[in-house]
Image (cartoon, rainbow, N blue to C red):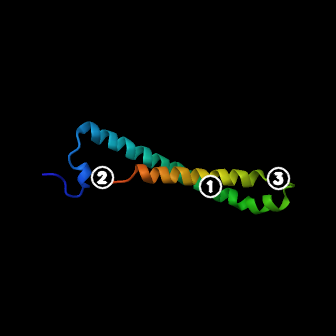
Amino acid sequence: MANQLLPTAERNLTPDQVEALDKRRELGHTFLVIAGQFTVIATILLLWVGQDLTYSPGWLHPIFYYFAVAIALVAIFGIAGFVLRKGTPRLD
């Protein structure tokens, strides 16, 4: 009998399909970890963004640019991680 806790699309997978599904979810988990690490970096950069925007001359705001890149990476890796991790998590 199929496991009723699994979504209907995952109940009758072959072993190769299950392995591919596990690899996809592991990649999604890796992306979520990377997003978390960049969240920490963005939080630390946030401490200097105000000072950078106030005191840096002209268009030279390197900390702000690093912060914007870090936020973009958090969004990209976070969304990709959530998409790849969809479905029932594996219990080990």
Disc number placed over residue 71 in the picture, else none: 1
Q: Quadrant of residue 39?
A: bottom right
**Mark 1–mark 2 contact, CB under 8 Å?**
no
Residue 56 point in image, percent of width and height: 84, 56
Q: Residue at x 62, y 55 (%)?
A: 71
Residue 51 point in image, percent of width and height: 79, 61
Q: CA distance from mark 3 to mark 2?
A: 50 Å
Disc number placed over residue 59 in the picture, else none: 3
Residue 79 point in image, percent of width and height: 49, 53
Q: Amino acid at mark 3?
A: Trp
Q: CA distance from mark 1 to mark 2?
A: 31 Å
Sequence-earlier tag: 1 or 3: 3
Q: Residue at x 64, y 56 (%)?
A: 42
- Element under disc 3: loop
Disc number placed over residue 91 in the picture, else none: 2
Q: Is residue 26 left or right of residue 57?
A: left
Q: Amino acid at mark 2?
A: Leu
